[in-house]
Structures are given as structure tokens and as C-alpha cells.
């Protein structure tokens, strides 16, 4: 099939040393990139694309005129950044010449280069990272199809990101006019915080998912390296968003000059300061992350702080679930369901009152059985926490009960205070997830075993029930039932 001459061209700027093949007879790294971008961008666009790069030809050939002509004919410049690239005067001339005429530059980072050494035209651009660092040695290794399946998979995912973004730009340019940059409104703009190196793959997956659902993902430039500039820049970016997403792993991450906080911690602090009803945060920690997995004491303290600090849950939700489940929660947060219409009551059940009896997974169901039986005997419909089954089904069941119940009784037994605070936050936020009526009553039932944190625990957000030793459910739950009856009766007079 012929290449459509009306499609703007792509120029690959690279250092020839980066195209040396590691295996004799196999194509070099740049050659593979060229071929695969051509294929994938063509697939996304629905027609072939025009890509040109200069082959290695003897110096006496008339390259300058040819390269200038090709640069003038191209609307896209793909710069393959590497230690050799930043040392190449010829690559710098290509970049400067293209920048003068105007066009879109895509920065492909084949290997890490200190940001101060990036050409000025590239310093502010977000790069497409095509390398990983060995977790044992810290040495970088470019991703390639010649390495193992894991590297191949990651390479192809990042190549797809690059090809997809190039094809979208070419699609806008086909009519010969520059695309207008139109800022998306807050409802379609999300701040996806920069992460530490161990979660770059997860961040890429979330970013791809958001973009393919039509969201603009910020930050749209690399974060500055000085703390004061980071704060100014991040605040400006957050102000354009309705939601920020923070992925927190086992590594501490980069620390800008002028602060002791990592960029991961700093972005979370700045997002928490937004503190408006229209803005919220989602914080994700990989499921099963343990203290022993975290080698850096600063990161261990940061993760412990997120899990224990009540401020974490003000305007935020902390989730330690599989990434795919997190993405499902993310989309429900961005597109909350419509408030449900009141379900028709069954015959004779007009006054049916639903109580959600919440326990920690470590509490045996036998511990809450007497409470559930007593509530049922008093005419209440009782729903209890369930943990068996598919994780997404369990979470959906829990969220449905948060929205539908008339009252909530939290059993504070084997669970710790952090778990309890999280359940209280979830009840408070249920209005934003489709709840159509206020709770009649919320109570915390403080059960054995006795612990210092239970001695300290108190709250004004719920009725605290501390049953006497040997107390029957009727006696222990009397204040809770009285609150429900008073709420149903309404204000006196």
C-alpha cells in the first residue's frame, strides 16, 4: 500500500552508535523502533505513515541539504535520548533546526541522562521511558525485543503508548492546520502523581486506561528538581483537576533540592491541601506490601503515616487492593452512579429497617452472631460483612450495603483502629457513591480482646458501645436501637 503523501512526516533523530546491533545479523535498536512505530502508528491511524531517519552514509555524501529538506517536510520529531545523543553536535543541529520551524517533539529515553544534560528543547518534555533499572545493581538496561519476555512485554506496551500518541497527533494534522490546544475541564482532567521507579509500570497502566477513556492526564511536563518550583508547578496542575491519584510502593523516590520529602510524599501533601468538596484523592498501595519489603526507613515511615494518620482519609480513600480492582474503583469515583430510586418495599415490609453489621476479616462470624440474631428478632433486616468470593464482588456487596443500609453497627474486635477509622470514612462518603438518605444511627461495638488502643478510642462520629462483661445483646444494643427509633420518629412536636 502506498504511503499517503498528505500525512505529515515523522523524523527520527538519533545517534548512530545507538543503532549498533548487540547480536550479529539482527536489526539495531533504532531500526526496530522505526519499524514498529511505523507499523503500530499505521494501525492506529488506519493508513501507512511516513517515517525518515538518516542512514549511516559516508561523510562526503550531501547530507546537510537532504536532512534540512526532510526536517522541513516533517511535522513530528522523535528524539532518541541517550548518553551519545547529548554528545552529538549533529543531533543537536537537527533538534535546533526542527525547533525553529515549529512542530511536535516526542522524547524517547533509551537510557537515562541527567536532566541538566538534556538539550534545552527537551528538558520540559515528558519522556517515553524505554529502560529499566536492575533492582540488585541499579544499572540501567534499555528495553528490547531481544531480551526476556518481561522486557519484551514492557517494551511493546511503551512502544504502543508512543505510537498511539503520534497517530493521534497525525490525525489532527492531516487537514494541514496545527491542532488547537484546548484545555479539558476539571471533570475530564486527572492528576496522576509521579511515582518511584518500582511503580512506573503500574502508573503507565493507569495512565493508558485514563487516556483511552478520554481523560487528560497531568502533569503534562516533567516535575522541576527544586522543591519550591515543584510546589508551584504541582499546585497549578492540581487546580485544573477534580481528582488526584497517588501510587505508593516500596521505594522512597527522588528528593528535590531544598526538602527532605520525596516527590511522592510532596505531591500527596500538596493534593491534601486542596481540601475542597469538588476535589478528592485516591491513594493506592500494592496489596500485601509489608514493612519488611520496604528497605528505606523514610518510606517505611511514610507508608505507616498514610495508613494511620486520620488526615489521610479527609477527602481521600486509601486502597490496598489489586491494581485492576483499583482501576474499577477509579472509574466509579470519576463516574459515580446515579442515586438509586427507593426500592419498592415487600408486602408487609413498609417499615423494614436494614442494619449493616460490619466486622474485620479476622473476626470470626460466631462473634457477631448473637448481635445479628438479636437485631433480627427485633424486626430488623441484617446484612453482615462477607469476605468469601471474588474480590470485586465482595467490594461491590460492601459498597451496596453502605448505600442501602438504614443503620450501621461496626464490630471493633480483632481489627485495629486504622481499620475502624477507614470504615467510618466509608460510611461518611457513601453519600457521594449513591446514598440517597442519611443514616439513622451509627455505632461502634467495642468487643474483646482488650487493647490499649481500644482504651484510648473515642469518637463523636458514632455512638461508642462498651458492653459490660457478660452483658446480653438486648442490654448492650439498647442505646443504638433507641437512636434508630428516635431518628425514625423525627423531631418532637
Image (tube, helix red, strand yellow):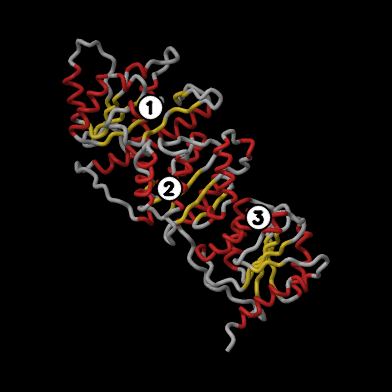
Relative image position of residue 141 (x, y in whole percent): 47, 23
Check disc 1 and report its element: helix, strand or loop: loop
Circle 2: element type:
helix
Spatial CA span between label 3 and label 2: 34 Å
Q: Is residue 421 above or below residue 465?
A: above
| Residue at image point 36% right, 53% down | 239
Which residue occupies the foreground of this view, 68 or 314?
314
Residue 210: which disc?
2
Residue 491 in the image: above or below residue 262: below
Residue 417: mark: 3
Where does the image place residue 254, in percent across and percent down from the top left? 46, 35
Q: Residue at x 41, y 55 (%)?
A: 242
Towards the viewer: 379 or 269: 269
Q: Quadrant of the C terminus?
A: bottom right
Along the line of sight, the residue nearer the viewer: 369 or 147: 369
Measured as percent of width and height from the top left, residue 36 is found at 38, 29
Tag on residue 114?
Answer: 1
Amino acid at each position: 500500500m502506498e504511503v499517503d503523501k498528505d500525512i505529515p512526516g515523522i523524523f527520527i533523530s538519533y545517534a548512530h552508535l545507538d543503532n549498533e546491533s548487540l547480536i550479529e545479523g539482527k536489526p539495531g535498536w533504532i531500526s526496530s523502533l522505526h519499524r514498529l512505530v511505523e507499523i503500530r502508528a499505521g494501525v492506529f491511524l488506519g493508513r501507512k505513515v511516513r517515517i525518515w531517519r538518516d542512514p549511516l552514509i559516508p561523510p562526503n555524501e550531501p547530507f546537510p541539504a537532504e536532512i534540512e529538506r526532510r526536517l522541513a517536510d516533517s511535522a513530528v520529531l522523535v528524539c532518541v535520548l541517550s548518553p551519545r545523543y547529548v554528545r552529538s553536535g549533529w543531533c543537536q543541529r537537527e533538534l535546533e533546526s526542527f525547533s525553529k520551524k515549529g512542530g511536535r517533539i516526542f522524547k524517547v529515553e533509551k537510557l537515562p541522562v541527567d536532566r541538566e544534560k538534556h538539550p534545552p528543547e527537551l528538558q520540559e518534555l515528558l519522556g517515553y521511558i524505554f529502560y529499566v533499572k536492575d533492582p540488585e545493581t541499579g544499572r540501567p538496561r534499555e528495553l528490547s525485543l531481544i531480551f526476556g519476555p518481561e522486557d519484551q512485554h514492557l517494551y511493546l506496551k511503551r512502544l504502543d503508548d508512543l505510537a498511539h500518541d503520534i497517530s493521534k497527533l497525525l490525525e489532527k494534522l492531516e487537514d494541514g492546520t496545527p491542532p488547537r490546544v484546548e484545555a479539558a475541564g476539571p471533570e475530564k482532567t486527572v492528576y496522576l502523581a509521579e511515582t518511584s521507579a518500582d511503580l512506573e509500570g503500574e502508573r503507565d497502566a493507569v495512565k493508558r486506561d485514563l487516556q483511552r477513556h478520554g481523560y487528560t492526564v497531568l502533569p503534562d511536563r516533567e516535575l522541576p528538581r527544586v522543591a519550591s518550583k515543584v510546589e508551584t508547578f504541582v499546585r497549578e496542575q492540581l487546580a485544573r483537576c477534580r481528582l488526584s491519584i497517588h501510587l505508593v510502593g516500596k521505594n522512597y523516590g527522588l528528593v528535590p533540592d531544598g526538602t527532605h520529602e520525596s516527590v511522592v510524599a510532596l505531591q500527596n501533601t500538596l493534593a491534601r491541601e486542596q481540601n475542597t468538596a469538588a476535589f478528592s484523592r485516591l491513594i493506592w498501595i500494592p496489596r500485601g506490601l509489608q514493612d519488611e519489603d520496604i528497605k528505606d526507613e523514610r518510606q517505611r515511615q511514610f507508608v505507616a503515616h498514610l495508613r494511620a494518620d486520620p488526615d489521610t482519609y479527609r477527602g481521600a480513600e486509601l486502597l490496598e487492593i489489586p491494581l485492576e480492582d483499583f482501576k474499577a474503583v477509579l472509574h466509579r469515583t470519576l463516574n459515580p452512579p446515579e442515586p438509586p430510586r427507593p426500592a419498592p418495599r415487600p408486602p408487609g415490609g413498609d417499615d423494614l429497617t436494614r442494619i449493616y453489621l460490619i466486622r474485620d476479616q479476622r473476626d470470626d462470624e460466631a462473634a457477631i452472631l448473637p448481635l445479628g440474631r438479636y437485631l433480627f428478632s427485633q424486626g430488623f433486616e441484617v446484612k453482615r460483612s462477607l469476605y468469601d468470593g471474588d474480590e470485586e464482588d465482595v467490594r461491590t456487596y460492601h459498597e451496596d450495603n453502605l448505600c442501602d443500609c438504614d443503620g450501621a453497627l461496626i464490630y471493633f474486635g480483632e481489627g485495629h483502629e486504622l481499620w475502624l477509622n477507614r470504615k467510618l470514612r466509608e460510611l461518611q462518603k457513601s453519600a457521594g457513591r449513591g446514598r440517597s438518605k442519611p443514616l439513622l444511627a451509627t455505632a461502634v461495638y467495642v468487643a474483646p480482646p482488650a487493647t490499649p488502643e481500644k482504651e484510648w478510642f473515642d469518637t463523636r462520629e458514632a455512638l461508642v458501645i462498651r458492653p459490660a462483661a457478660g452483658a446480653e445483646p438486648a442490654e448492650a444494643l439498647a442505646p443504638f436501637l433507641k437512636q434508630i427509633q428516635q431518628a425514625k420518629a423525627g423531631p418532637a412536636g
